Image (cartoon, helix red, strand yellow):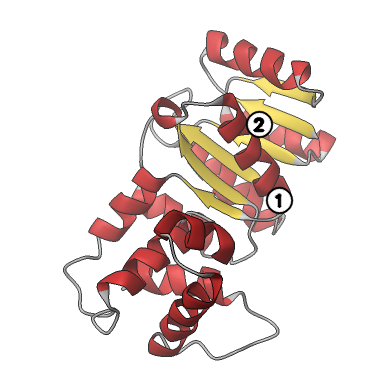
Amino acid sequence: MRIVIAEDSTILRQGLVELLTFRGHEVVAAVKDADALRAEVEAHTPDVSIVDIRMPPTHTDEGLRAAIALRRDHPGRAILLFSQYVETKYAAQLLADRAGGVGYLLKDRVAEVSDFLDALRRVADGETVLDPEVVSQLFSATRQTDALGGLTPREREVLGLMAEGRSNSAIAAKLFLSAGSVEKYVTSIFGKLGLPPSEGDNRRVLAVLRYLDS
């Protein structure tokens, strides 16, 4: 894959460059601020960009706002946020375009290089990949509402795994269920959330968004 990296930590930025290059990928640019990120993505059109949330000059949300702007101007452009922080408001905004190709991983929770590389590949392929801790915090922000009151505890568990970007087969393996059982849970979730079959919308993403918007 052709990759752009935006990370203000020189050590981490260089480490990512070496790791990805060693694994056969091409890092077309590695920058330390959001302005440079936007310029390099426009110049190189990478398969995926790895973006830290907090970068110069204020170290608050420059990277996240740059990612949202890139997705707004170029729908579907693959972005993997790789951060120490969970920003629930902006995570919901990134998911809101429904185009896929979005990931949000927490640096401290990536224990295996293979997991990081797998997430990067899935995002580049157009999937949505969220760290379980990100999902947990997103869900906790809506836990007091009754918009999803009709879901059973098991259905909420399945929905949480859907939000992490897991397929039905992966959910089945995680919960020790049959593929048919997971399919029934997913169908039930769609029905309770009022999401009929549609050729134009991804119901899995819409189900997660319905939770986040509640």
Identify the residue position indicated by label 1 in the image. Answer: 77
Q: Secondary structure at mark 1?
A: loop
Front of the two marks 1 and 2: 1
Tell me the quarter of the picture where residue 196 sits: bottom right
- Horizontal and vertical percent for residue 148? 29, 78
Q: Residue at x 27, y 78 (%)?
A: 152
- Is residue 183 placed above or below 157 in the rendered structure? below
Q: Secondary structure at mark 2?
A: helix
Which image quadrant for residue 153?
Answer: bottom left
Residue 93 in sight? yes
Q: Residue at x 45, y 66 (%)?
A: 177
Left or right position of 148 against 115: left
In the image, residue 131 above or below residue 176: above
Q: Residue 50: horizontal and vertical position, in percent?
A: 62, 33
Q: Which mark is residue 37?
A: 2
Tell me if 20 is positioned left or right of 185 in this view: right
Q: Are marks 1 and 2 in contact (CB under 8 Å)?
A: no
Q: Quadrant of the N terminus?
A: top right
Relative image position of residue 89 (x, y in whole percent): 36, 54
Mark 2, Cα crowd under 10 Å, few <14 / some 14-19 / many 20+, is many
| Label whose residue precedes the other's in the sequence (1 or 2) | 2
Disc 1 residue type (three-letter): Arg
188 vs 107: above or below: below
